Image (spheres, rainbow, N blue to C red):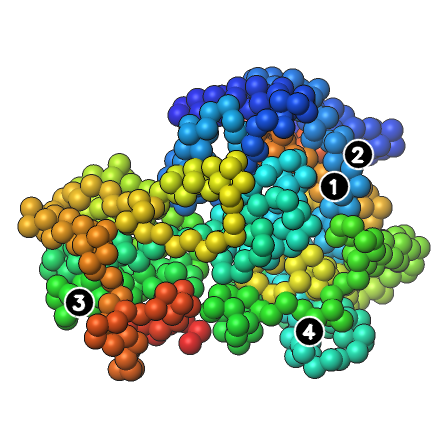
Amino acid sequence: MPLKLERQENVPLAGLVAAPFVALAFTLIVGAAMFLAMGHDPIEAFRIYFIEPLGDAYTLQELVVKTCPLLLIGVGLAFCYRANRWNIGAEGQYVAGALLGSWLALATHGTGAGPWVLPAMLVLGALGGAAYGLIPALLRVRFGASEILTSLMLVYVAELFLDYLVRGPWRDPAGFNFPQSVTFDAVATMPLLLDEGRLHGGIVIALIVVVAATFVLGRTLVGFSIELGGSAPRAAAFAGFDEKRVTYGVFAVSGALAGLAGIIEVAGPIGNMQPSISPGYGFTAIIAAMLGRLHPVGILVSSFVLALTYIGGEAAQISLRMPFDVTRVFQGTLLIAILAADVLVRYRIRRVEGVRHA
Amino acid sequence: MRKILSLALGLAAGAALAGAGALPASAAEKLKAAWVYIGPVGDFGWTYQHDQGRKAVEAAFGDKVETTYVESVPEGPDAERVIEQLARAGNKIIFTTSFGYMEPTLKVAKRHPKVMFEHATGFKRDKNVATYNSKFHEGRYILGQIAAKMSKTGTIGYIGSFPIPEVISGINAMMLGAQSVNPDMKIKIVWVNSWFDPAKEADAAKALMDQGADIITQHTDSPAAMQAAEARGVKAFGQASDMISFGPKSQLTSIVDNWAPYYVKRVKEVMDGTWTSTDTWAGIKDGEVVMAPYTNMPDDVRAMAEATEAKIKSGELNPFKGPVYKQDGTLAAKEGEAVPDKDILSMNWYVKGIDDKVPGQ
């Protein structure tokens, strides 16, 4: 029986709002079945997964620390995705930003440089990410190359360059030949917001970015041109919006925010340069952006929820001895459920008689 | 199936322990010990061997210990949080089993002076942070001798992970072992820049075989290279675990990591209150480096390998005994001396006879 998806003209607002909650409920049911099959009390498992991390000052801070890079990168990706530009290489822009910012930290290491170092590092980080993000934009505008492929492949270039630097020129001479740089000086480190824990100033920057992005995307002509270029490119062209400028613009913003996330992470929780500076934030942020419906506030919520599934997963490993793969199954179920709910709200499934394939 | 079974068993045990943990009185009697793993536990390789050590601790102390592990923890900020949470969960000793956990371990240790930390393969210690590692290079020397006997082309294919001292010293030890049998042995090295990447490891093995290597060895974790060698009828060595099931006709032997003696000893010391921060580097003699059965080789080669193993065990033979020459001809250890431990632990040069360059040097 062939089926066909048909786009609904008037999507009810209630459906759009309800969809994520239905998806969440579905995930919880699947999760409960999984926990039961493994011989656990599902209520207890959910408590450890989702409630316990929220009840402790330390893990709450950790949640925010984990949310920060996902949020910054996710908001940047929203610019690209709204304009129908598919930047898959935020991970590479994150690394590029971290590299340029760290260069300053290492160049001034031990020189007694003043408190200007950290702000300058943040600026360099954003510039580095933006410059790196502009490469796929240029390739698309000039040569028509698919930005999906070029941005993804540039991730590996950035990672290998980082690898080369920390194993070669940037290696700590006192580090027994192991691949990592010296620890950054205090002036090159993100300030902590509380005495206990690791909550750092990065989240303040991220929240400012959320507010600014909400305003730009929702209330300005720039935001409108991005949106229109994505949904109706011909109409945008007639309206006089320059498609090339939009491409460059969204990639620069997206790259800058990813680069900023990179240098904040390196100058914050990591504290030096090492071969691996991201557990895949640039890719997880794609999920955050999609789950947040490309709205900065939505991405704030989705980044937090994703961070919660990570940290809850760790707690479940520690107190329930649940394997790490359960966390991954959980995240996967949530993503599929949300995407499915989205499709079911926006589209209608129709039986197609006769013809086998459309 | 095996995984599901062990999972079910582990969970049943976990549920029992979690129940006990709810009561502070019974929790206080048990010593809580925890492990942090870089990869999934799986059925072979680096993390699997550490988990075997954890199970040995459970077997040795029964009701007196409660062990926990967290797997697939990325190096960096996530590691610090996991270690912190384990310390907060009341663990008295925490083993962090990858090099990249060094800084996170030290940071958490500062905040929890009453918890003992053990960092594998690192070099920074503190009052409550000990380090430990194995002399894998002792096993590599034996591999080198076997390779030189078994190879027809005179070329060893070596799959490297990262050019860090542990891996470099393994390559050197293998070469020194090979040269002790055949001074003209050659070694070809391919770096895959990963500890675990089956596709890359298999490609590297094929490339090495195409270049004439007829003995394959690896410093990476998957059995992919072994399988590639088996498919072409080429001999190979396993790594970390006995990989004979992946290369029944290919495997000559494996270097098997055995952390059980160390883990049992250290947990006992915490129980007795005698734990101190130490730097342990144990090898074949201590049972930490174990050679899998010598297979697929003639009796005389097996006899040579067993004799060398016995000599290393008795202390009669040090793989890095002098004279050892660096590639550029300078002397690293004089006749009658051996390369000092600190030079092995920071090794970034090849011995004479290796026709390659250490990356990044």
Amino acid at dot 1: Thr
| The C terminus of chain A - image quarter | top right
Q: Residue at x 15, y 65 (%)?
A: B180
Where residue A89 sits, quadrant-wise, is bottom right
Q: Which mark is residue A55?
A: 2
Neighbourhood count class around disc 2 (C-alpha, 10 Å): few under 14, some 14–19, many 20 upward: few
Q: Is residue A55 above or below residue B329?
A: above
First along the sequence among labels 4 and 2: 2
Residue at image mark 4: A105
**SS label for mark 3:** helix
Q: Are marks 4 and 1 on the same chain?
A: yes
- In the image, A143 versus B242, the foreground residue is B242
Q: Quadrant of residue A104?
A: bottom right
Disc number at residue A59? Answer: 1
Kindly check if marks 1 and 2 are in contact, taking CB atoms under 8 A apart as contact. yes
Work out how far the residue at label 4 is from the one at label 2, CA to CA, in angstroms. Answer: 36 Å
Q: CA distance from mark 3 to mark 2?
A: 62 Å
Give above or below for A151 relative to B324: above
